Image: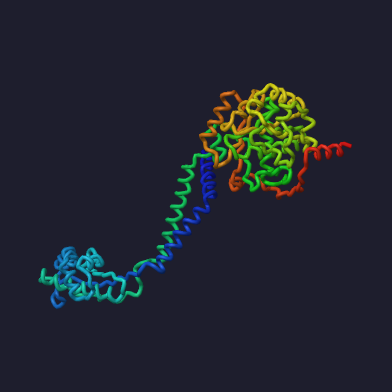
């Protein structure tokens, strides 16, 4: 239960961090606008108060019973003070140019329980007029109440004076209220937007919506076409790939599989970025790795390594070119086979017996074969390559890929009995990595490698062997 609560709090904090700009903007806007209105737009309102006392004439002796009687009658006197009769009488003493209804909307009559006191007050944008209105109201009240209840005596106790400070706007209170309300509204809006968001946003979403384990969380980076494991081995992103590598190798070894298919539900989710970097990461453990670009429709592996795509997989299958002749040797442990040129139906090529034979041959020669394939939902190419000896990892673009399309991908893979190992959550907001320890090391800056052709790479490796 504590863990669940902790996760909920963590999720809330992630949402707040994610929408912090929106929250700050709305809160600041509400506060600033209210401040401007309070100081420069809203007109001040002044209130003056006059106090009257109800009883017998002061020259006469007042008994205790009479005091009680007048206390009981105070409600009656208050109603007299609130009457139209009194309002019209008060207007006759003033030159305000308003109706009796308008006058009454600005007056206030209050009686203090257990006393013989009635307070009459009047509000106006002018302090002097407010005092005049309160005093005129009191005089009218005295005059009219004596006509109606001649036995009683109503006298002014405290005359209304010009108020020095307006009752509104209360500038400090308004600004404080605006800040609190703006903050509450912005937080509510942030959580509402998150609630409407039907994308995969976290490991919990992967588990809850897809029932799959998360193999790795890859932080968002500015340049996704970057071999960051090689160029910045101590960076946060590189550490995330190394953690992912551990999980993948454990799962593959448990299943007795050495071929890994990296795919995604839809385009632009970062599958090639994942496949290239994980190939480098596995090779760094001393394992011989072959990365094959099986995305014959839109090949991009060659761009990551700055190598030519003039020949590749298509040429091996269709033209029966020898793999060793056109393969790019990146280092002692990592080789890359690009897609090559294709003037043929890619689905038929990938479904061919020659392709199956090629994969079996490569599995014997390399410790791990990594296949970068087209998106699963968009094309059938990836599904064609699935066998019980091919592990599949699904790359999901965090906060971008819809839950429905992820479920569809999973179902398509399930239909062909794919060995779906798990999910790589890509382009995760770095703020979600607080506490993961990926920033323990400083960002290492690897040497910038120049563009090399396959021939240059082969010659470079030959010279190293000599």
- Residue 416 in the image: x percent, y percent? 59, 23
Residue 397: x percent and y percent?
58, 40
Which residue is pictured at 78% across the width and 28% down the height? 322
Residue 256 placement: quadrant = top right
Position of 299 compared to 53: left or right? right
Residue in the picture at 44% in, 56% down: 182
Name of the residue lying farthest toward the top: 353
**Figure check: 412 above or below 429:** above
Determine if residue 142 is in view. Answer: yes
Number of on-image labels: 0
Instruction: Give x and y (percent) for residue 189.
Output: 45, 49
Image quarter (top left, top right, bottom left or bottom right) of the C terminus: top right
Left or right of 45 on screen, residue 185: right
Does residue 71 appear in the picture of this structure?
A: no
Which of 323 and 194 lies nearest the eye of the viewer? 323
Viewer-proximal residue, 225 or 73? 225
Q: Left or right: where does residue 13 sit relative to residue 165?
A: right
């Amino acid at each position: 239960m504590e863990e669940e609560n902790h996760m909920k709090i963590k999720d809330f904090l992630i949402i707040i961090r994610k929408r912090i700009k929106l929250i700050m903007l709305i809160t600041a806007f509400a506060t600033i606008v209210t401040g401007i209105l309070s100081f420069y737009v809203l007109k001040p309102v002044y209130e003056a108060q006059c106090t009257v006392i109800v009883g017998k004439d002061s020259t006469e002796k007042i008994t205790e019973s009479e005091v009680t009687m007048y206390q009981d009658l105070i409600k009656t006197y208050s109603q007299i003070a609130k009457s139209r009769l009194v309002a019209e009488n008060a207007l006759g003493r003033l030159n305000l140019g308003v109706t009796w209804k308008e006058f009454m909307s600005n007056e206030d009559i209050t009686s203090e329980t257990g006393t013989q006191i009635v307070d009459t007050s009047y509000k106006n944008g002018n302090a002097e007029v407010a005092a005049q209105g309160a005093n005129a109201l009191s005089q009218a009240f005295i005059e009219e109440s004596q006509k109606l209840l001649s036995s009683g005596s109503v006298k002014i106790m405290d005359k209304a004076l010009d108020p020095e400070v307006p009752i509104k706007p209360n500038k400090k209170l308004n600004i404080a209220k605006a800040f609190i309300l703006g903050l509450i509204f912005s937080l509510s809006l942030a959580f509402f937007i998150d609630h409407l968001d039907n994308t995969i946003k976290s490991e919990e979403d992967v588990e809850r919506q897809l029932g799959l384990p998360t193999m790795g969380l890859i932080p968002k980076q500015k340049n996704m076409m970057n071999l960051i494991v090689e160029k910045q081995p101590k960076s946060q992103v590189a550490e995330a790939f190394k953690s992912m590598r551990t999980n993948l190798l454990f799962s593959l070894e448990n299943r007795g599989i050495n071929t890994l298919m990296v795919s995604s539900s839809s385009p632009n989710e970062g599958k090639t970025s994942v496949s290239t970097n994980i190939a480098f990461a596995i090779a760094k453990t001393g394992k011989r790795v072959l990365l094959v670009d099986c995305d014959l429709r839109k090949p991009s592996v060659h761009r990551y390594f700055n190598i030519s795509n003039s020949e590749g997989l298509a040429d091996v299958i269709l033209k029966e070119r020898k793999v060793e002749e056109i393969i790019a040797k990146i280092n002692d442990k990592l080789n890359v086979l690009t897609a090559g040129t294709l003037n043929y139906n890619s689905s038929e090529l990938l479904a061919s017996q020659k392709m199956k034979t090629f994969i079996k041959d490569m599995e014997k020669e390399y410790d791990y074969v990594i296949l970068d394939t087209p998106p699963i939902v968009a094309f059938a190419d990836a599904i064609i390559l699935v066998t019980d000896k091919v592990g599949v990892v699904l790359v999901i673009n965090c906060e971008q890929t819809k839950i429905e399309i992820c479920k569809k991908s999973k179902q398509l893979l399930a239909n062909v009995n794919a060995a779906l190992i798990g999910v790589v959550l890509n382009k995760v907001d770095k703020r979600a990595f607080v506490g993961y320890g990926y920033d323990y090391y400083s960002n290492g800056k690897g040497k910038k490698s120049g563009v090399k052709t396959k021939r240059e790479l082969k010659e470079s490796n030959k010279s190293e062997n000599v």
